[in-house]
Amino acid sequence: MSDSSTFEGLLETVREAALDLWHKGWAERNAGNISVRLKETQRPVEVPGDGQWVQAGVTVPDLVGEMLLVSATGSYMRQVGRDPREGMGVIEINQTGDAYRKLWGFKSDQNPTSELPSHLLTHAVRKRVSGGADRAMIHTHPTHLVALTMTRDFNTASLTRLLWSMHPECTVVFPEGCGFVPFEVPGGNALAVAGEAALEKHALAVWEYHGVVGIRPDLDAALGLIDTAEKAAAIYTVAASAGGVRRGLSDDQLRAVAESFGLQLDPDLLKG
Ligand code: 2HA
Ligand code: ZN
């Protein structure tokens, strides 16, 4: 595992995460994007700081003055996995929280990811609800989770209950549940706003027909969160194709697993 306490170390963890997403088949072509809200020690040393302010399309007072390492629009995880200096850049948020300027990276006049509104609103809400702990966000397209959204009408409770019931690890890794965001156009503000609402209570949300968002204090934890949900969806898929899903963890079993880790499960989610 890389030491991500410096900018160079962080770039190495981004490289590893991007390669992982590519090899898992969750980042076809330019799919998926990564952002990290930088700690003081993680800021790049040499920045020109004279870039033009660009309207962000959303307003994030919670992120005033923050710097974020973000993937560039159109960048390929496969490329970022070879060299994170290709396809990544650092932006700074202005003093009113409605604009950003580029500080580092963004080769050949690239711009931040098309999902920047989602990244900004997600960082803002999670900074607030996690007391500043959550810093690393991944949006990716895990096959089984996306396919699952095509099998029935979901809401947050029914999706959470299904994932929990497929794999005991899920209650431990995301005891607060998994948000469900009905389809919105990729890259749009409506998607960002719907995602923000879902992420107020959850660190993980599935975007119907599209992908998933996970945010945790670092990239390894964000990936681990998504890995665990995707594993549950894969188990569901294999069981379904092996004759049908006829059983899974019961509510009592889920509560017992949670209690053994000192966790409480939201009873409303168990009704799903
Ligand atoms: O960056 O994944 O949602 C490409 C996407 C858009
Ligand atoms: Zn996407």
Image (cartoon, rainbow, N blue to C red):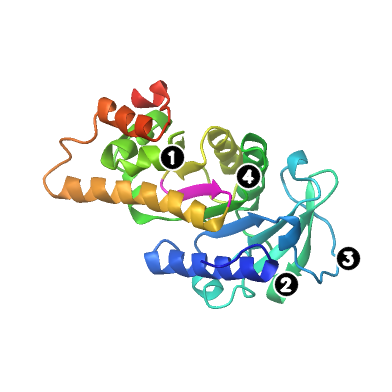
- Say above or below: 99 vs 177: below
- Camera-near label (2 vs 1) is 1
Tell me the tag on residue 174. 1
Q: In terms of sequence position, does the residue under pointer 2 or pointer 1 come before the other?
A: 2
Q: Quick one: quadrant of the C terminus? A: top left
Residue at the spot of label 2: 109
Q: In terms of sequence position, does the residue under pointer 3 or pointer 4 come before the other?
A: 3
Q: Residue 5 at what x, y percent from top left?
A: 66, 62
Q: Is residue 27 left or right of residue 197?
A: left
Q: In terms of sequence position, does the residue under pointer 4 or pointer 1 come before the other?
A: 4
| Label 2 crowd bin: few (<14), some (14–19), many (20+), radius 10 Å | few
Residue at the spot of label 3: 50
Could you say whether the residue bearing mark 3 is in a helix, strand or loop?
Answer: loop
Looking at the image, can residue 210 be seen?
Answer: no
The amino acid sitting under disc 1 is Phe
Instruction: Check the image and name the residue furthest to the right.
Output: 50
* Mark 2 vs mark 1, CA separation in Å: 38 Å
The amino acid sitting under disc 3 is Asp
Q: Residue 163 at what x, y percent from top left?
A: 33, 39
Residue at the spot of label 4: 133
Instruction: Check the image and name the residue furthest to the left.
Output: 243
Mark 3–mark 4 contact, CB under 8 Å? no
